[in-house]
Image (cartoon, grey):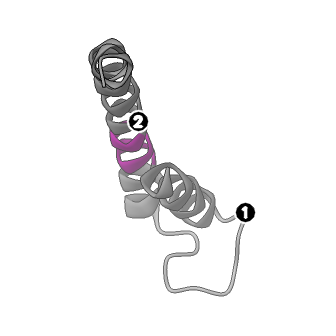
Amino acid sequence: MLAVVVGAVWTLQGLGYLSGSVMTDDRLWAVVGPIVAVFGIVLVGVGLRLRRRQAPENQGTAGDR
């Protein structure tokens, strides 16, 4: 989730909506920001999918104790 937030902030700074940084109005950050945000969304999706896949295995072993 941190990558999503950082990517969004970088995008807003690159587009000039957030000021006070050397990244303000720098088009490089307007391109890099969305890439980082999408990467963060993909990581969250993979993490949720792996968590869902492992959940039934953990529930079955707890009941056998």
Amino acid type at image mark 1: Tyr
Q: Could you say which is closer to the camera, residue 12 or residue 40? A: 40
Q: Residues within 10 Å of mark 1 (few under 14, many from 20)?
A: few
Q: Is residue 47 above or below residue 2?
A: above
Relative to residue 25, is residue 48 drawn left or right? left
List the residue tagged with mark 2: 44
Which quadrant of the figure has residue 32?
bottom left
Amino acid type at image mark 2: Val
Residue 39 position, x and y percent, is: 33, 40
- The label nearer to you, 2 versus 1, is 2
Which quadrant of the figure has residue 19?
bottom right
**Disc 1 on helix, strand or loop?**
loop
Q: Is residue 21 above or below residue 60?
A: below
- Residue found at x 54% / y 55%: 11
Region in magenta: 34-40
- Residue found at x 37% / y 49%: 36
Q: Residues within 10 Å of mark 2 (few under 14, many from 20)?
A: some
Residue 50 position, x and y percent, is: 28, 24
- Residue found at x 49% / y 76%: 23
**Disc 2 on helix, strand or loop?**
helix
Alpha carbon of mark 2 to alpha carbon of mark 1: how far?
A: 26 Å
Which of the labelled discs sits on residue 49, or is there none? none
Q: Could you say which is closer to the camera, residue 45 or residue 17? A: 45
Q: Is residue 9 magenta?
A: no
Which of the labelled discs sits on residue 17, or is there none? 1
Q: Is residue 39 magenta?
A: yes
